[in-house]
Amino acid sequence: MQFADRLNNVETSAIRELFKLLGKPGIISFAGGFPDPALFDAEGIRQSADHVLSHNPGPVLQYGATEGYGPLREQISLFMAAKGGAGSASNASVAPEGLIVTTGSQQALDLIGKTMINPGDKVIVEAPTFLATIQCFRLYGAHIIGAPVDADGVDTDKLEALIVEHKPKLIYLIPTFSNPSGATLSLARRKRVLELAVKYNTTVVEDDPYGELYFDKAPPPSLLSLSAQVAGSRDLLAHCGSFSKIMSPGLRVGWMIAPPALLANATMCKQFSDAHTSNVTQAIAAHYLTLNRLDATLATVRTTYANRAKVMAASLHRELGSAISFNAPQGGMFFWAKLTGEGGNPNNATDFAKRAIDKLVAFVPGAPFYAHDADVATFRLSFATVDVKKIEEGIGRLGEAL
Ligand SMILES: Cc1ncc(COP(=O)(O)O)c(C=O)c1O
């Protein structure tokens, strides 16, 4: 068979290869990017599924609207209005017609690529960023440029210099508890990003699947929320949301909030792709949101992840000391660490990952998360699915693998 040239732009991820080794018995894995299934509110979702299939199931089992199931669009609109807490509540609000439901936020990213990226267009992303976005945008021929990130998210001075140099078609950011860096963009930098969007007339994509997973205090308001304070910025902003990390990824329900022209084009392309996201799972999510169970579920998820993150930070300090540097995240699911190479310690995370697998502990080397100029000393650890005893044991093994 002869395949499309666009496939030359992408390859299956290096991480996938590593995952093949994770089936070893007894392995403790910090490599995954999944939420903890033990924290899914299976009972609430089952009640919702029962309700949906026993009350007027016809419309839910029928074909539906490409834009999304009406009651879910309304519930997402309410969810967005409540997000961000008192004070900023109304700023992130969006009418049901101002959003479309997508098959996970991953599809929203694909639709953005499909509708906006011409071969050769430049796209700025964080270095490091979400691997699937690099791959997806490359499939459309994007030339991807990485902007450096520190503990406060993307460095906005360097971002501006890159915008001036490359005149990108769009900028893709994960401002809150990023995957993989764990970093959160500071409030001042958030405002600056919006100002830069307006100054250089550049579209910004805000990917926000982790914002609700904060540990002690809520993160700064989303770019979407802050766009009310920067004239013209809302017209240049696409915001992708998802229930994957707070309800269930298997439902495949995400959404995109964007200016009308982008929503219309994305809806048209979605029509040719999957026609619409499953009405059944949309209706389940919509009903679930009316049950008032999400707050309690989220409270448990937040304390559980906060505790695991605390134990991971303490274990890393204790077991790896000056062999690594890292910033403890304030939410989300990931630690981003860097081998220092100090005192003869290792400085290549891929070699370290192989030795770690021999000691029955796994993590993901950082290189694939860079679009170019990878920092091979970096690596990602997820604490989300590992209980605290196993975290201590696993990080202990990591220390032995140095
Ligand atoms: C940054 C980021 N964006 C988007 C996604 C896709 O999530 P979903 O399609 O399940 O909503 C993920 C999943 O891990 C992610 O980490």
Image (cartoon, grey):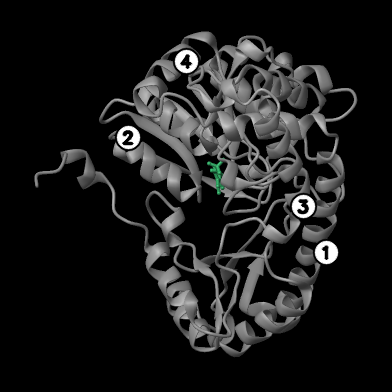
- Mark 3 or 4: the one toward you: 4
Contact, mark 3 vs mark 4 (Cβ under 8 Å):
no
Q: In the rendered image, which residue does mark 1 sit on?
A: 307
Q: In the rendered image, which residue does mark 4 sit on?
A: 262
Question: Based on the displayed image, in which of its 4 quarters is residue 325 positioned?
Answer: bottom right
Image coords of residue 225 (percent x, y): 73, 23
Contact, mark 4 vs mark 1 (Cβ under 8 Å):
no
Q: Upstream in the sequence, badge 2 or badge 1?
A: 2
Q: Upstream in the sequence, badge 2 or badge 3?
A: 2
Image coords of residue 266 (percent x, y): 44, 20
Q: In the rendered image, which residue does mark 2 sit on?
A: 142
Q: Residues within 10 Å of mark 4 (few under 14, many from 20)?
A: many
Residue kind at label 4, given as amino acid type: Leu
Residue at 51% from the left image edge and 23% from the top image edge: 62
Contact, mark 2 vs mark 1 (Cβ under 8 Å):
no
- Mark 1 or 3: the one toward you: 1
Residue kind at label 3, given as amino acid type: Gln
Q: Upstream in the sequence, badge 1 or badge 3?
A: 1
